Image (cartoon, rainbow, N blue to C red):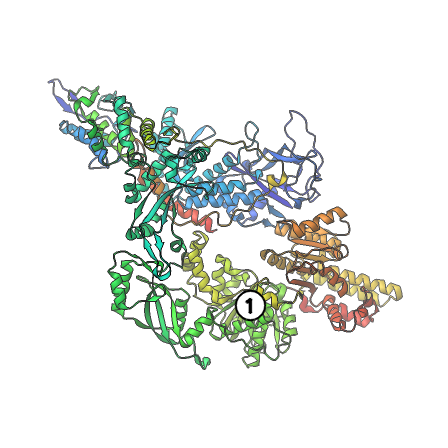
Amino acid sequence: MIILHSAWREGRLFLWGEKGVNGEGGQPSRKPARRKDAKPPAHPRLAASGEIADAVRQAPMEFFPAAGDEAETVAWLPSAGGLPVPSSRLLGGMPESGVPAELENWRLRGLWLAPGVVMEWLGRCMDRKTLGPGMVLGDDIVFWTQALRFASSLTAREQFIPSLARVDDELVARWDAVWPGPDAGRLQELLKVMPHACRCLRCNGGAPVSSRMALEDFLRVQVDHMVRSSFSPAIAALNRRRRKEVFESIHEHWLHALRSPEGVLRDAEGDLEQLERQVREWRRPLTVATASSFRLCFRLEEPLVTGEGECAEAQGPWVVRYLLQAADDPSLIIDVKDAWHPTAARAMLLRRHDFNVREYLLSALGQAAGICPRIEESLKKAGPAGYELDDAGAYEFLTQKAWGLEQAGFGVMLPSWWTRKGTRARLSARVSVRSAAMQNTGALSLDEVVRFDWKLAVGDAELTAQELEALAHLKTPLVRIRGQWVQLSGDEIRAALEQWKKKGLTGALSVRELMRMAMGAHSAGRGAILEGVAAEGWVKEFLAQLQGDAAYEELPAPEGFCGTLRPYQIRGFSWLSFLKRWGLGACLADDMGLGKTIQLLTLIQRDWEKQNRAPVLLACPMSVVGNWQREAARFTPQLPVLAHHGMERARGADFRPLAARQAIVVTSYALLHRDFDLFKDVAWQGVVLDEAQNIKNPDTKQARAARLLKAQYRVALTGTPVENNVGDLWSIMEFLNPGWLGSRGEFKQNFFYQIQVDRDPEVFGRLKKLTGPFILRRLKTDKKIISDLPEKMEMKVFCPLTKEQASLYTAVVREATEVLEQKEGIGRRGHILATLLKLKQVCNHPAQFLGDHSAIEGRSGKLARLTEMLEEVLAEKDHALVFTQFAEMGTMLQRHLQETFGQEVFFLHGGTPKRERDEMVDCFQNAAGAPPIFLLSLKAGGTGLNLTRASHVFHFDRWWNPAVENQATDRAFRIGQTRRVQVHKFLCQGTLEEKIDAMIEAKKEVASGVVGAGEGWLTELSSEELKELFALREEAVQE
Amino acid sequence: MSWRDHYGFYQHSAPRVTHGGIKAQSRKGAFGEKWWARRWIATLESFQIGARLGRGRNYARNGQVLSVEVEKGRVQARVQGSRPTPYDVLIKVKTFSSGDCVRLGRALAGQALYAAKLLAGEMPGDIEKVLEKMGFSLFPGKLRDLQTRCSCPDSSNPCKHVAAVYYLLGEEFDRDPFLIFKLRGLNRDRLMALMGREEAKAGGRGKRKGGAKIEPVMAEKPDPLSTDAQLFWGGKELPSGWLGGVRTPPLHAALLKRLGSFPFWRADERFLEAVEAVYPGASEKGRKILAG
């Protein structure tokens, strides 16, 4: 494993890698000799620069480091006992606690990244913990990705000016980032979280730079680069037109340098000095604003209200008050009145901030006066502190001036009823629909056309035409209605009136259109904003059900369903059925373990019983195909299920008739695309995507294929919270309800940019409203759900074998059965147990069976499934225990999981010393930010420990003794556990694991004594029984 | 340009082509957009020097003025004429007496508006009235307030070289209203201090002198590396939403526009136009990186 680090020095980022302490290719961590006046020793655990270059390339980008990029430099690193302390426990070999660390110099080897590479590469590292297996990003790199975000945000908001900088004694033209106002606060936030490793490199003179210097330099260099890399051909052409080397003036030279890739200015020193002076003079107003530790704010205060309730009346004027807000502490606010003539305490506060308050205030007010003439008026006396205004003035301030002032970098504070989006009362239009009562729903559809009336309202009060006319003549657009300030713009009212007169107030629309309107897809355009649909009759009922305001019919579980549905599962299945009935796609996004599979099977069973017998196509990851088959066999045994995968799958003309006989055809995402020609001709009843996050990228082949399939209904199942991930939402919604969110381009324009970049909560709210009715997500921590759940839920997880596993498995079985015939007594017993062990090892992982420390990734079905499921656990911010009975498997799992997730994974086994054991348990249970995954060997960790922070327990392999497994499970499921515990027992499908499990299930009722304390009972089986037990069923193997 | 021919008459000749002289930013029409700049130029134009005004304007636009230095009470400039050696131009302006300065400060301290406007790059609109009441003018009106000299052979004073410098100064006043005070012997800091002192007196409680420090320098606090591995290697979570939203600016290059023209700009391309063109594309680039 390599942990990547990067540190900034003098305009460039140095990237280097740190290796683990024990082996893994790292040099042995011997204490290097340190001689006086020799150059510092090389870091003993450095990754080779080739490996780092590979790491950079792993983030998909074209980057080939040039020979000159590879370099040595010297860093200050915390060291103890003559060795650098590992940056993370992932690397092992942490020094004994209590050994004091000190800073020592170490030689590092790595790559210098130019600003362009930094921009590209850090951009790819955003929101990631690893670059690939075993390539972990250090916290310092995570920090730089945040700093890059900030730099991009400064560039996007145009917070930069043309300027100059001195770099290596040369004058360079630079697009200089500036951070006046709130950006100073953001810079401060960043500084607070910056790991010192970001600036650990030795500079000239030895000391490292300060955090502020490092960060500011990074921002300036990156913003400058972003600006330069954004030039359009037209801008570049301006420079090319005059490629001559002689410039008529230093100004022309400067302009040229600002537009060229490199900005170095070489001119007579006198000219350069003059330019420097002029630039300084020119940007002086900004320098003052940037250096200011306070910001001028304007607060609009409402008139005092006298009386109560309906009789409440506003008296006196509105006031705009001038305030100073500290940049580093927004809660520190000083009334400007007190700042002109500060009391001793205030003066001290301002002085402590080293702030020329008077000059700043005057200059800021002078600028604000240019935006708002009323401010200018207020300055016509000494020590202005605000001004008064009437309703019309307040309206103007709210709608125009406040915005202008904010744009200019001033703070603006407005009454909460104005700023809280959605609660502001204003003129709104509603569509009013009267439709027949909901009867005989079978005949109704979304294509039904209904007549509607427009209704105009202010707040809750509906308006007549006369009232509207009267309002149109109001002088002040801000009126107080029923104790609430309401904004009424004359323009809006006139536009609404015009529309009213021209078009009349009735129309006709399809229910589908109405539905979109009701969910906020349309606004009424000019005039009033559309605030909703008020309907009567079945349309009302339908809309209310859709938006969750009214219950949809709860259906009884179909007769052929074997099992019990929990109340929330009944609701989920009824919800699916409700949307299906209206031809709408549904995304069931319940937490892992809540039974999405069962809810969907119920839906299909119900159709089957109602003689709707067209097949349903279900696409899922390869690792869960077997699981689906088994769950269907258990809960809906009447349903014919076809697993369409493997070499033996039906092709060509055989497929259609075969599929037509099924209730469910299960296939993998890979085949969804590859066998699309088979699938596209079948008249599917439904298309279901399990783990639907697999199509989050709409450009992938599987996503395209999924969208193209024809079906009467569509369902997506996923355990990850899609509704929060705006980028992924479009693809899934486009599959479910094509066109609902508009084309991809429209979606980007209307939602994605505004949410992802602008962070506009109103747009986010609109998107939620628009998609909410199609997404059902219940968390297992929901109060309603918790009461439905048993305290402990056990689930079997069926995993496929990889081809390699399957061939190893058959080889072991072949050899074992040959030998079996020749053995008797103790020899036979030993042979059987040895074979069992080998087969279990093969099921776990080929590398465990071979014991050859070979590669881990991609060779085991169980491992793939475990990784997928743990990813969900981590996404839910949950904690998990993973049990295995093999120490060597535990070691492999630890390494694999650490490398995959880039965070520490505890492993407790027989060899763990008592003290370390206690520390791990205590940390897992109590520490904030503790490693969320805890691996335990069944023997060492199966008893005694209290690990109730976990609510998921995984049994990676089986002990074939429920009592032992339960005891292990009880580490999490015991006193102190307040949540529901999910137990996932892993089995390889079609192998002895599945068969033994079935035998135990069958005998469970008899007595646990029958199966005995260990695996000994298996040796009592006859040879025929054993052969049957060992035999591998072909369908077990994955593609 | 002109030289004296053998009859002793002036003849025009083209001035020598300059490279990198100061170029007026206004392409045509009046110099200076702001009233106080116009007011300054009006003084020049009241001198009745005929066609020399027009030639002076062309000089200013073509970059014949090679350098301008504004000091207390005087402007020194070098202007390229038709002779190889540039002419030296000197404009002397009568400075305010220190008593006048104090009175002026007191008069302007009554309203915060004056200082605020000046700091925001604007000359307060009624400043002349205020000064008039006190019996003096901010702009040199009469010849006794203003002396001009040029090393050219033209006997007319002001000559076109003086006029060119005068026009360019007008543009500079546009940019920096403090410049005219500086010329009259009252630099920015002193003027701010005078206005502040008066205001502080009126308030009665103020202790801090105005204008003491204009650019507070962030003191570089000692910031040593920690030996604690957690502090050294470990990052912390940023508060959610720390970056805020990023709306496309409704008005491009707002910062640039707030700073305005560059002092004594010397290039063919106009400063604001050339630089402003960069902003929209850069903003888009930043948004793209943020969107991932």
Q: What is the x, y in percent for residue A851?
A: 75, 53
Query: Is A646 displayed left or right of A414 in the figure?
Result: right
Query: Is A919 displayed left or right of B76 in the figure?
Result: right
| Amino acid bearing label 1 | Asp
Q: What is the x, y in percent for residue B9?
A: 11, 20
Residue A649's quadrant in the figure?
bottom right
**Image position of A260 with respect to A472: above or below:** above
**Image position of A916 with respect to B59: above or below:** below
**Image quarter hosting the C terminus of chain A:** bottom right
Residue A978's quadrant in the figure?
bottom right
**Image position of A938 with respect to A902: above or below:** below
Q: Secondary structure at mark 1?
A: loop
Q: Nearer the viewer, residue A583 or A196?
A: A196
Q: Nearer the viewer, residue A426 or B288?
A: A426
Label 1, on which residue? A675
Using the rendered image of the protein, determine whether residue B18 is visible from the camera's viewpoint: no
Pointer 1: residues within 10 angstroms few (<14), some, or many (20+)? some
Q: Nearer the viewer, residue A814 or A251?
A: A251
